[in-house]
Image (tube, rainbow, N blue to C red):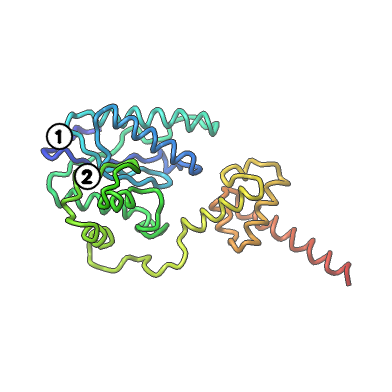
Amino acid sequence: MQRVWRTVTGFYRVCARGTGKQLIFEADGDRWEFLELMRECCRDARVTIVAWCLMGDHVDLVLLDYEDEMSAAMQRLLLTYARRFNKRTGRTGHLFRDRFERRSLDTDWQVMEAVRSVHANPQEAGIALIERYPWSSFDEYLWAYDNDMTRGFSDPSCVLELFGSAEGFIAHSLSTPDGCEPALCDMKETEWERHAFAEKLAKGLGVPLHVVKAAPSAQRNIVILGLHDAGLTVRQIERYTGIGKSTVSRIVRACARTAVRSDGNMV
């Protein structure tokens, strides 16, 4: 990684990506574990978490580091999480790219834009509206403006005055660099909400969504048919479970043929 000279403000935009677009979170439990570990590593290194967003294959952060301890904190965080993730999932090899990305933020405007951009990750990816995505610090800023600093994983207090008020923060966060309306402003249901619904349904059928692919065929088929009956498309089931489209289609078609035969026998 090239040397990044320390910024006079102490603020940095930091991004850690899965190697080869590897998914770094398989379930909500992974995300909670990463957040708790992130808080511990940054607190021990006296690095302030200003803003954060967890995406499927990367983590985007704004950090405040006056003591030049950020590299050590990030290395500990990524290595520790990768070891735990690999042990839990049975995978081997690097989970993250060898080097995380960081960029100095040298003006107030750059800090404000970095916070906005971090929170805009899910919207720009077409996953969810900024204000409806649960895995970012967006809500923590609103709590902070209400003087509730007891919840969450970030400490927005050092940048709140840049936005002026909660209304100013929201207006800046929901704006776009080119002044256009957000692309997802009319979405009735977000991709995230569909995925969360699928996770809840799969658990209700006895198999967590992220292990459906490895489940015995009878259990796997029950979950696939349950998801399909609930209105999810074959492509959505493929995306959420990791089971190939041809396999999902075969299971759905086999169930449909069985139902037709049963109806015919009843006539």
Q: Which mark is residue 218?
A: none
Locate residue 126 relative to residue 66 in the image: left or right.
right
- What kind of element bears circle 2? helix
Q: Quadrant of the C terminus?
A: bottom right
Locate residue 103 relative to residue 58 in the image: left or right.
left
Q: Residue at x 54, y 51 (%)?
A: 240
- What kind of element bears circle 1? loop
Q: Which residue is mark 1?
A: 5
Residue 60 location in percent, x, y? Answer: 32, 44
Q: On screen, 189 above or below 1?
A: below
Quadrant in which residue 211 is drawn = top right
Q: Residue at x 35, y 58 (%)?
A: 131
Residue 149 location in percent, x, y? Answer: 29, 43
Q: Which residue is mark 2?
A: 157
Residue 170 location in percent, x, y? Answer: 26, 59
Q: Quadrant of the N terminus?
A: top left
Q: Residue at x 41, y 58 (%)?
A: 128
